[in-house]
Amino acid sequence: MFGLEWSNVNLDQGYIQVTHILNEVHGKLKIKEPKTASSRRRIDLPKIAIDALKQHRKRMTAEGHESKFVFVNEHGGWWRRTHFHNQCFQPLLAKAGLPKIRFHDLRHTCATLLLQDNVHPKVVQERLGHSKISITLDTYSHVMPTMQQAASDSFDKILGKRS
């Protein structure tokens, strides 16, 4: 997220393209290639995210923070994860009356919600950038037990209920 450039955001067609990441090594921030080929990916955005990004861009422009990066700190520079977490994310959670969580937990929440809404695990894998579907399935299999009942219900529907 912190390395995302506006050139990789297509608000008209509703997607972002992950082509690089912002990495901190020994206190130095650097843009680098994602770890794996599957980490370089297109992620289609829901309308709510498109609208939020449009508003965010207008706000940045109004505040004089013209940057090629989508998310910048108050000085127009890169966010360090710890600063973002302490200065933005945790206060936002507190203001909303939500429990303290790590920012990365939002990624898990997203995957869990998608799987619980019967989004195919392969799609979830691609959105997360996992190199293998087994990573996604091993990590999120605990949210999939209800899918067994859904499979049984599908067979009833396909084959016709028999009493």
Image: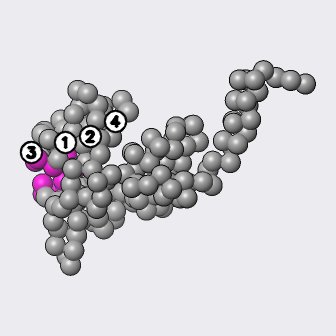
Gap between marks 1 and 3 measured at Cα: 16 Å
Q: Is residue 94 above or below residue 160?
A: below
Res 23 quadrant in image = bottom left
Does label 1 or label 3 sit earlier along the sequence? 1
Q: Secondary structure at mark 1?
A: helix
Does label 2 or label 1 sit earlier along the sequence? 1
Using a 10 Å C-alpha cutoff, classify the residue at mark 1 as few (fewer than 14 neighbours), some (14 to 19) or many (20 or more): some
Q: Are marks 2 and 1 in contact (CB under 8 Å)?
A: yes
> In the image as oriented, which residue stretches furthest toward the front?
159
Residue 124 shown left or right of residue 68 in the figure: right
Q: Which residue is mark 4?
A: 44
Q: Which residue is mark 3?
A: 66
Residue 20 in sight in this render: yes
What's the amino acid at mark 3?
Glu
> Can you tell which of label 2 and label 3 is closer to the viewer?
2
| Quadrant including the C terminus | top right
Q: Residue at x 28, y 62 (%)?
A: 35
Q: Which residue is mark 2?
A: 16
What's the amino acid at mark 4?
Asp
Q: Is residue 111 above or below residue 102?
A: above
Q: Which residue is mark 1?
A: 8
Q: Which residues are magenta?
A: 65-76
Q: Residue at x 71, y 23 (%)?
A: 158
> Can you tell which of label 4 and label 3 is closer to the viewer?
4
What's the amino acid at mark 1?
Asn
Gap between marks 4 and 2 measured at Cα: 7 Å
